[in-house]
Image (cartoon, grey):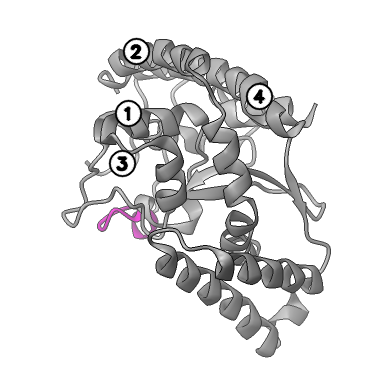
Amino acid sequence: MAREFECDPEKYCGNAECCRSKDTVPGLGVGDLYRLSSYTREPIVHLWHTKGDVCLTESKGSNEFPVNLGLLHDPCPYLNRDHSCSVYEARPLGCATFPLNLFLPSKLNQSDPFIKDLCVWKELNLLLNN
Amino acid sequence: MCLERVKPTVEQLKVVKEVSDIMTQEAHIEVEYFWSKRGGPLSLVVDSIGDYFNLAGQAVLLQAKRSHKGRDQRSNRLIEKINNMAALCDSGEIKNGINFDDFLMNLRPVAFTLFEDEFADMLASLDDKVFRLYDETSTRLRSLLKKM
């Protein structure tokens, strides 16, 4: 059942690249925003204006781009100078589950139950599109 | 810790499964109480480079009208990405098709500017009933995330 995470050190290691790389932009749920807001005591709407972004997902061959909530990522506004996370205890779930969330359908077999269980963003998109 | 060749343990996978279930529950809450406020999902249709620059023009006009704190950084980022796209067009790279990730990088600030206020209003209208649901999932998540 266990798979190996095939890390590309140039992409993800060394300088908190996963907190700034265009390959690892996390989608954000309202729950993530709420936890960040509670942890930092920054009102949720203010947090959205100062640190929010949109997360655009792949449109599968069409020119339509589903828009979800996101967080600035160039770099992440919560990334400290020493590459630690200033909101680690309330970090977004996309960050908390990294790299396991890289086991996504676009990368691996979609029919695999292991992948299906992990791919919650796919479920969200399905819900949104139905 | 370097993640090279790391294999998730069975215990980690169990935790991720539990986290995944909570994320799914939160996704349902989000659909029911957040996205429903605008009548459903949101998509941006960009059929051509002309569409991109049309949206970019709307975003620049919107941004110019705003006066929130920290707007300068937002404006700079928006202009930088639009300039990046213009440079791609000027360089002729466009004929071979723009790298998809680069395209998304240049589209994100445009989309954010267009939807920033609408999403802010949607967030502002969430009430305590919804936040109590997130309090419940967050409490469960806190203990799980300590195990990851």
The chain identifier of the residue carrying mark 4 reads B
- Of A122 and A106, nearer the camera is A122
State yes or no: discs 4 and 3 in contact (Cβ < 8 Å). Answer: no
Region of the chain picked out in magenta, as a range = A9-17
State yes or no: discs 3 and 1 in contact (Cβ < 8 Å). Answer: no
Residue A122 falls left or right of residue B13:
right
Nearer mark to the viewer, of 4 and 3: 4
On whether disc 2 and disc 4 are found on a single subunit, the reply is yes
Q: Where is residue A1 in the image (x, y as percent from the top left)?
A: 48, 19
Q: Mark 2 points at which residue?
A: B139
Question: Label 2 neighbourhood size at 10 Å, few (<14), some (14-19), many (20+)?
Answer: few
Question: Label 3 neighbourhood size at 10 Å, few (<14), some (14-19), many (20+)?
Answer: some
Q: Name the residue under label 4.
A: B31
- Give the residue at x 55% y 42%: B120
Image quadrant in which the C terminus of chain B is located: top left
Residue A113: which quarter of the image? top right
Q: Mark 1 points at which residue?
A: A38
Residue B42 falls left or right of residue A100:
right
State yes or no: discs 2 and 3 in contact (Cβ < 8 Å). Answer: no
- Secondary structure of residue under mark 4: helix
Image quadrant in which the N terminus of chain B is located: top left
Look at label 4 and name its amino acid: Val
Q: Distance between the residues labelled 1 and 4?
A: 21 Å
State yes or no: discs 1 and 4 in contact (Cβ < 8 Å). Answer: no
Q: Name the residue under label 3.
A: B3
- Of B124 and A118, nearer the camera is B124
Q: In this view, does A13 lie above or below B73?
A: above
Q: In this view, does B64 lie above or below B148?
A: below
> Is residue B100 within the magenta segment?
no
